[in-house]
Amino acid sequence: MHLLWSNLARKLYLWVLLFIVFFSLMNWVVMPWYVNDGGTVTVPNLVGKQAAKAREILDTLGLQFEVGGNKSSKLAPNTVLSQNPEGESVVKHGRRIYFILSGGVEKVTVPNLSGHSQREAQFMLERAGFILGKVTFDSSSNFPQNVVMSQSLPANSLAPTGSAISIVVSAGTPTVGEVSVPTLVGLPLADAQRAILNGGLLLGDITFQPSRRLVPNTVIEQYPRSQEIVPKGTKINLFVSSIENQQEGPEQ
C-alpha cells in the first residue's frame, strides 16, 4: 500500500487523469466546436450541370467551387461529370468542392484517304475512330477504278471521334459509248426524267411507293445507282413516292 501512494505513483496517476481529461475535452468539446464553427451545409448533387451554374449554386450555400480536372465526354464542354465530396455530404461552411468537368468529345486527326482503295479507306477510318459515311462513285481519268478521289472532311483536320466521313470513289474512265448515271434520288420525277434523257439514257420502269415523309412524285431510289458507268441508252428504273398506291408506270 505504501508503494501505491508513493510520490512517483501519485504523479503517474495525476498524468493519467490529465490525459483522460485532455482527450475528453478534445473529443467532445474542441473538435465538435471546430467542425461546427461557422455551421455545416449539405452538399448538393451538381453532376450534369454546367460549371457556371454549379458555381452559382455553391456561392449561395457558402461553399467554394474548385476544378479538379477535365475528361473527354459526349456531354457538352464544362458539364460536371463528378464531384468530391459527393452530393448529400455534410461539410463545414466554406469547404472547397472539387469537380471533374467534361472536355467535350475527343477530337482526332482525319486520315488522308485519297489514293487508297475503298476497303483500305474503311479500315483507316475505323482505326482512327471514325466510321465510313456515304460512298459515291464518279468517273475519272486521273484515278484508277475503285480508288478514293475525295473525302467529306479534309485530311489532317481535327474532328470528333465517331464522326461519319463520306468518300467519292473513282468509277474509272468511261469508254466510248459509256456514260455516268446521274444522281436522281431526291429529285422531282419530272426533273429526273430530264436528267436521264440529257444524259443519253432512257427512262425504264416507274414504281410508286406510298410515303408520308416525302412530297409525292419524289424519286426514292434508282437502278442503276448514281455514278455507275453504263452504256448509253441504258434504261433507268425509278422508285417514286406517292400518297396512295398507284400502278407501275409503263416503260418509256
Image: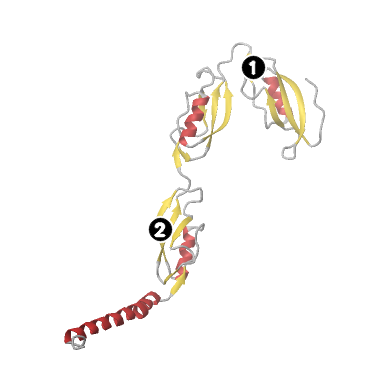
Task: Using the image, determine if residue 56 lies above or below residue 224.
Answer: below
Residue that label 1 marks: 230
In the picture shown, does residue 78 fall above or below 239?
Answer: below
The percent position of residue 144, horizontal first and vertical second, equals: 51, 18
Of badges 2 and 1, nearer the viewer stands 2
Q: Is residue 138 above or below residue 60?
A: above
Bin the neighbour count of mark 2 within 10 Å (Cα to Cα): few under 14, some 14-19, many 20 and up. Answer: some
Q: How is the image coloured?
A: secondary structure
Q: Position of residue 224 (x, y in %)?
A: 67, 22
N-terminal label among 2 and 1: 2
Report the Cα–Cα distance between label 2 and label 1: 62 Å
Which secondary structure lies at badge 1? strand
Q: Is 100 in front, or is 148?
A: 100
Q: Is residue 189 left or right of residue 5?
A: right
Can you identify the residue that label 2 sits on? 67
Query: Horizontal and vertical percent for residue 226?
Result: 63, 25
- The part of the image, by quadrant, that contains residue 145 is top right
Quadrant in which the C terminus is drawn: top right
The residue under the point 76% across, 23% down is: 205
Query: Could you tell me the amino acid type at mark 2?
Result: Val
Query: In x, y percent, where is residue 216?
Result: 76, 35
Kind of residue sitting beneath label 1:
Val
Q: Secondary structure at mark 2?
A: strand
* Numbered tag placed on residue 187 in the rendering: none
